[in-house]
Image (spheres, rainbow, N blue to C red):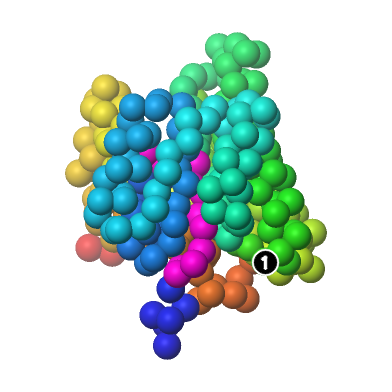
Amino acid sequence: MIRDHLDFSDRVVIVTGGATGIGFATAMQFAQLAADVVICSRTPDELFAAARRISEATGRRCIGVPTDVKNEEAVIAMVERTMAEFGKIDVLVNNAGGTRMGPIESIPTRGWDSILDLNLKSAYLCTREAGKHMIERRRGAIVNISSGAGVSGVKGGAHYSAAKAGLQMFTRVTAAEWGRYGIRCNCVAAGAIASERVSEAWKVAGLDSEELGRSTPLGRIGVPDDMANMIVFLASDAASYVTGETISVDGGPTIGGIKLD
């Protein structure tokens, strides 16, 4: 039965960027499905508070490991801490990411590098380090978090779009190379998801979330659990024959044509 395939008992999950938004919702869902969870971010107080909330709500072990995922040594230390605490890694969710928007002509080289490091290099580092242990056990699931910017691009986000498109191809190549080890790798491209920080950014930019929602075929804005649902599915045994794919969670395609109402 499908619920049996969604049982994460005795499994260990790492979620980067797990203290807020999509990452927190995802970590919570894994713990509710009986996984032990490691979350990481750069803000210790926020991170430790999130880990306590997850543990108290689910009764599962959830530890916070302060980590700058752009830093190779920090990623290595985070994976080593996970192995020391739990002895294995079953699932990796490369969720950490973000951007600052700006036209191509005004993006400084340092800014370009920083966005690619956060959204692409970090996933490579985490995948490489966690993957060593998955390869040894010949099993594992990796889910990378992309964006609609990586599928169709976004004006004012050349660096972010390039990084997320690169992440999608990195997903595909990882799946092709590591399938022989029993490791699956998939990607979820987020549409307009109203996490706490994104909602604040919309307000600052003068964007109306309800109007954004009405522009989708489903007529509503997304919430972090919409993403978490897909992430958990792709990491689960229910998706045991799915790998190398990028799946959009965006309320549906917006396309041109005649007006139907």
* Nearer-the-camera pick, 44 or 6: 44
Furthest-bottom residue in this view: 1
Residue at image mark 1: 139
In this orientation, does residue 238 appear? yes
Q: What's the magenta bit mostly, secondary-structure-wise?
A: loop
Which stretch is magenta?
Answer: 8-20
Q: Position of residue 232 (x, y in %)?
A: 45, 62
Residue type highlighted by circle 1: Arg
Q: Position of residue 158 (x, y in %)?
A: 58, 29
Q: Is residue 13 magenta?
A: yes
Q: Residue at x 50, y 55 (%)?
A: 13
Please state, as top left, top right, bottom left or bottom right, where the N terminus lies in the image.
bottom left
Q: Residue at x 62, y 34 (%)?
A: 77
Asked whether, in this view, residue 19 is left or right of residue 92, the answer is left
How crowded is the residue under tag 1: few (<14 C-alpha within 10 Å), some, or many (20+)?
A: some
Q: Is residue 35 magenta?
A: no
Furthest-front residue in this view: 84
